Image: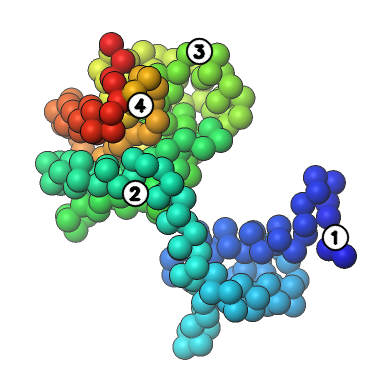
Amino acid sequence: MEEKDLHGRVQSVERAMMLLEVLGEDDEGNRLTDLVSRTGLAPSTVHRILTTLEQRQFIQFNPTDRLWHIGRQTFAIGSAFARQRSFAAPALPFLRRLRDQTHETANLGVVEDGEMVLINQVESREIARAINRLGGRVPMPASGMGKAILASYASDDVTRVLSRCGLRRFTRNSLTRRAALEAQLEDIRENGYAIDDEEFVTGLRCIAAAVYNYQGESVCAISISGLPSRIPMARVPALGRLVVEAARELTIALGGAVPG
């Protein structure tokens, strides 16, 4: 029988998921020794799980460089997550237009367990551009899209999110005090857009706005992201208006209503 831990999790499944998560973090691929080092599992265990996942096409092995990569079946399942969010496809033309207007990468994200999950993206055509990994997760308080949605929440709901994900320091600009976050949320309510000023990744600035359903509840958010040199603070108000307008039009296209 499969060994289970105190929470009822099957050990082999837990280990397979761990390997998939590690492989998903690196587009360049991983050697067997890398995966052993990063997971702490025995080489024989890692190889056995990799072989099983490869047979199911969740991962693939390149014999030339001896690197393991995420496979097409993992991508197919990940795409299903995006497709079940009914606003992913309708958002695409708005993201493309926002990319063309700002010349920066445009993003779409949803909330899951106190984090923003990136589910769609239209890359900037500029050589120097910001690209986040689809499926990547960022705690809501450290994300422009996350803060745009938090600004629509009642105080008790913000507290519940913070109890789950906290206010962690990722960069020197990260918000680590509730008072600082609340001050930003007030600014977001007034301006309509949120800013991630290198708060999760140094060298990445984002401007975001929330998208609402027919009940006036935020269901997702869109943003643009780029290098601080391409999005200087002097440019933020003008870009913010473009992001807010795109979010408003997407809200209307989805049959939603912007509060107020």
Q: Position of residue 241 (x, y in %)?
A: 17, 26
Residue identified by numbered label 1 = 3
Q: Amino acid at mark 1?
A: Glu
The residues tagged by marks 4 and 3 sit, at their Cα atoms, a distance apart of: 20 Å
- Tag nearer the camera, 4 or 3: 4
Mark 4: give few (<14), some (14-19) or many (20+) Cα within 10 Å: some
Whether pointer 2 and pointer 3 mark residues with C-beta atoms closer than 8 Å, the reply is no
Say which element carries label 2.
Answer: strand
CA distance for labels 1 and 3: 42 Å
CA–CA distance in space, label 4 to label 2: 18 Å
Is disc 1 placed on a helix, strand or loop? loop
| Upstream in sequence: badge 2 or badge 1 | 1
Mark-to-mark CA distance, 2 and 1: 37 Å
Q: Earlier in the sequence, mark 2 or mark 3?
A: 2
Q: Residues within 10 Å of mark 1 (few under 14, many from 20)?
A: few
Label 2: which residue? Answer: 120
Could you say which is closer to the camera, residue 4 or residue 80?
80
Q: Looking at the image, tell me whether mark 1 or mark 3 is earlier in sequence order.
A: 1
Residue under circle 3? 155
Q: Is residue 217 visible to the viewer in this orientation of the structure? A: yes
User: Left or right: where does residue 177 sit relative to residue 109?
Assistant: right
The residue singled out by tag 4 in the image is 213
Q: Residue at x 15, y 43 (%)?
A: 97
- The CA span between labels 4 and 1 is 44 Å
In the image, taking residue 252 as reference, residue 13 lies left or right, namely: right
Please tell me how crowded label 3 is: few (under 14), some (14-19), or many (20+) other residues with Cα within 10 Å: few
